[in-house]
Image (spheres, rainbow, N blue to C red):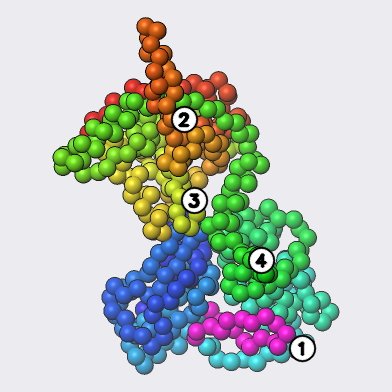
Amino acid sequence: MASVVIMPKQGQSVESCILTEIRKNKGDKVAVGDILFAYETDKASFEEESKVEGTVLAVFYNEGDEIPVLENVMVIGQEGENIDDLLAGAPAAEAPAAAAAPEVKAAAVQAPEITVHESAPAVAVEGKRAISPRAKALAQKLNVNLAYVVATGPEGRIIERDIEAAAAAGARQTPLAAKVAAETGAIAPAAGSGLAGMARACDLGKAAAAPAAAAPAAKGKDVLESGDDFEVRKLSNIRKVIAKSMQASLQNSAQLTHHLSADARRIQALRKQAKKLLEEGKLDVNITLNDFICMAVIRALKKFPNVNTHFLGDSIKYFNKVHLGLAVDTERGLMVPCVKNADDLSITGLSRQLKAVADACKKGSISPDILSPEAATFTVSNLGNYGVEIFTPIINLPQSAILGVNTIVPRPKDLGGGVYAFVPHIGLSLTYDHRSIDGGEATRFLKQIATEIETLEVEF
């Protein structure tokens, strides 16, 4: 019996994924464990393995398509097996476009051809807007928000090329967003926070009521415009997410940064001790300076619960556990994975968890759920390895604060008895939301982090 392969749901917040690579095409033999296709969310990449053996009988999408989660992607069965009942529920094949319309990719599985001319008098009415049957079918397939489609057909009717232009301009929405909008009357934005600017259900109500004009279609896959001495490329999905979240953070919060340094001799001594134990085979994890700093931050957060919070506008969410976010630089962009219940971990356990989530980010296999800004209660961003002496980190909203860790530099210090010497100091930059935390409390918390660093005690 034929088996349907669906687009997996990676995390509760993910509504659709982009099909990045098809490894098995129609007619290919498949064994259990073979990679069928690769796909990605806004920040992570995954591969789908076959659970059955057989032959690929149908593939419903092309590489680059954005597919709703739990949607059928392909069918695997025995050669010659009848799968008409499965094809009946497959995404509709695209009809040939008019000569003047932009090129549209053909679906891998062709449904029985039904000829419908754009000049036909029968039209479907979507709200108060007239739309041709072919255009309506294409809008449903591409998840285009009809409120942002500019009609160019006879008597103001939406025709197929209008849907194609709107899709190219980014006026798309997830199936869930379309369903919620239809049920509630909420307005979906022309460009949302989903993959490739697709409007998600959480974006509803953020748009202006007036339809936006369609933008010119992109030239090529990534290049929008080029000249003799320049090239304009469209943003990657992850860069769009980073740009929106950073801008929203600065626009929607009252951020202030305090800077302070801590004597780093204690954590440097612990680092030497851990390195020696690792060389002797008594430790199986390489504990770094950043691991010790994160442990100090966790202990400071337990003493300042007002910082271990989310600011929600008219309320504050207090957490009993520390879910620590760590900023990780990857080839695809900045990611902030979260280590849940970090306050329950030993220094070796914390080091393992921090390395595990950082490696998963770099490999593109991180779970979207622990990348959500709501997953962490506080974030650490360490630029010390790059030699940065001072910087102003941006809060990962709705978190109330973020700590920036700077490089270690020698500074003069009174050692007592009239003796001064240069000792290593590590710079700390705390950015906090003044709506959630007062300046005095933020200063005391930052000082507590410094104290924890200078007096840190751990068991290996």
Query: Looking at the picture, which amino acid does disc 4 mark?
Result: Asp
Relative image position of residue 178 (x, y in whole percent): 62, 64
State the quadrant of the N terminus.
bottom left
Q: Mark 2 — residue?
A: 427
Q: In this figure, which residue is indicated by the disc labeled 3?
A: 334
Q: Is residue 236 above or below residue 55?
A: above
Q: Specify the quadrant that holds the C terminus.
A: top left
Q: Which residues are magenta?
A: 91-109
Instruction: Report how far apart the C-alphas of labels 2 and 4 lie in the structure.
Output: 41 Å
> Which label is found at residue 119?
1
The 10 Å Cα crowd at callout 3, few under 14, some 14 to 19, many 20 or more, is some
Q: Earlier in the sequence, mark 4 or mark 1?
A: 1
Q: How many marks?
A: 4
Q: At label 2, which amino acid type do we have?
A: Gly
Residue beneath disc 4: 229
Q: Overall secondary structure of the magenta stretch? A: loop
User: How far apart are labels 3 and 2 at the CA level?
Assistant: 21 Å
Which percent across, then down, holds residue 421?
39, 18
**Residue at 50% in and 46% down:** 373
> How far apart are the alpha carbons under marks 3 and 1?
50 Å
Q: Which one is in front in this view, the residue at disc 3 or the one at disc 1?
A: 3
Q: Residues within 10 Å of mark 4 (few under 14, many from 20)?
A: few
Give the label, 4 or 1, closer to the camera. 4
Horizontal and vertical percent position of residue 52: 30, 77
> Looking at the rendering, which quadrant does residue 190 occupy?
bottom right
Mark 2 or mark 4: whose residue is earlier in sequence: 4
* Disc marking residue 258: none
Nearer to us: label 3 or label 4: 4
Q: Tell me the element at label 2.
A: strand
Q: Could you tell which of marks 3 and 2 lies nearer the N-terminus?
A: 3
